[in-house]
Image (cartoon, rainbow, N blue to C red):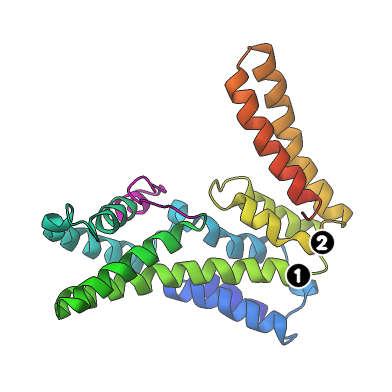
């Protein structure tokens, strides 16, 4: 089963990749795979969904985003619309950003913590608007966009569920987790809070929390030496959130 999961996680399709996460979760729950079967690679590949925009080179990922970017400018007249203008603006900016490997939430009026849910709900609102206008083509388009981002969001929630349910962590598994956690920005705290049930594990403390805090704390000393009070304040808040997660809070 491990090899079957890995094969999907190495898929050339984003749908295949997300299916790999789903199979991992189902297999762990029915004991077809256990912690003894897990290592650095399978954990890193699974956690990579938390920063999928950074590395995705799937042909269907690029082609889907390109198609969306081709048609959305045709809705420019709706940007000033009182009800849906901000949804359209947020969606267009977000899609352009992830195509370039970046997260840009600047166009959304109220951005939530889960970045892909922002795009999913914006597309849902646009779909419902065009349904009311009896515009079948536009309804179909935004339903497709909603489904696309819903799939990515579902994959992230699936990975978070896996992390929460894993009980016996090895050093290799913790290292695979750390590689992704240290690189993601928007989903870092989500990842760390997903392992709240195993924060008492010495492996988790040493190879995830202590390792990360040992990078952050010298940065604070450097800011202090340079008199960069604003950066110190921001970093203190960040360190506090990591310490809180390390206690399972």
- Which SS type dominates the magenta stretch? loop
Do the CB atoms of the residues marked 2 and 1 lie less than 8 Å apart?
Answer: yes
Residue visible at 75% across and 85% down in the picture = 31
Direction from residue 131 to residue 148 in the image, left or right:
right
Q: Residue 117: give x, y in percent of width and height.
A: 44, 63
Mark yes or no: residue 12 visible: no
| Residue 24 found in image quarter | bottom right
Q: Residue 91: give x, y in percent of width and height.
A: 30, 57
Point out the residue furthest to the top here: 226
Q: Determine whether the residue tagged by mark 1 lies in a helix, strand or loop.
A: loop
Using the image as rendered, state which of residue 13 and residue 225 is in the foreground: 225
Magenta segment: does it hold 213?
no
Q: Quadrant of the C terminus?
A: bottom right
Q: Quadrant of the N terminus?
A: bottom right
Region rendered in magenta: 95-112
161 is higher (above) or lower (below) than 30: above
Q: Distance of mark 2 from mark 1, alpha carbons?
A: 8 Å
| Residue 230 found in image quarter | top right
Q: In the image, which disc is placed on residue 32?
A: none
Residue visible at 16% across and 80% down in the picture = 136
Q: Which residue is mark 1?
A: 166
Magenta segment: does it hold 99?
yes
Direction from residue 232 to residue 62 in the image, left or right:
left
Q: Which residue is mark 2?
A: 198
Using the image as rendered, state which of residue 49 and residue 57 is in the foreground: 49
Crowding around mark 1 (Cα neighbors within 10 Å: few <14, some 14 to 19, many 20+) is: some
Mark yes or no: residue 106 visible: yes
Q: Which of the two discs, 2 and 1, labels the residue nearer the N terminus?
A: 1
| Residue 2 found in image quarter | bottom right
Q: Determine whether the residue tagged by mark 2 lies in a helix, strand or loop.
A: helix
């Amino acid at each position: 089963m491990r090899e079957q999961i890995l094969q999907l996680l190495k898929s050339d399709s984003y749908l295949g990749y997300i299916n790999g996460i789903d199979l991992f979760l189902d297999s762990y729950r029915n004991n077809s795979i256990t912690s003894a079967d897990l290592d650095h690679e399978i954990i890193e590949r699974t956690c990579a969904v938390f920063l999928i925009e950074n590395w995705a080179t799937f042909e269907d990922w690029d082609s889907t985003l390109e198609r969306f970017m081709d048609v959305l400018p045709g809705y420019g007249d709706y940007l000033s619309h009182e009800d849906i203008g901000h949804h359209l603006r947020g969606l267009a900016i977000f899609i352009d950003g992830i195509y370039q490997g970046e997260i840009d939430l600047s166009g959304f009026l109220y951005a939530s913590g889960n970045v892909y849910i922002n795009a999913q709900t914006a597309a849902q609102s646009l779909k419902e608007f065009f349904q009311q206008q009896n515009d079948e083509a536009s309804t179909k388009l935004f339903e497709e966009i909603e489904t696309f981002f819903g799939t990515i969001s579902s994959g992230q929630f699936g990975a978070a569920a896996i992390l929460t349910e894993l009980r016996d962590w090895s050093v290799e598994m913790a290292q695979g987790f750390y590689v992704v956690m240290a690189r993601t920005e928007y989903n870092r705290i989500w990842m760390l809070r997903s392992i709240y049930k195993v924060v008492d594990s010495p492996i988790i403390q040493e190879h995830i929390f202590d390792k990360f805090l040992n990078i952050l704390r010298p940065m604070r000393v450097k800011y202090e030496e340079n008199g960069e009070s604003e950066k110190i304040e921001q970093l203190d808040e960040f360190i506090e959130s990591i310490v809180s997660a390390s206690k399972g809070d």
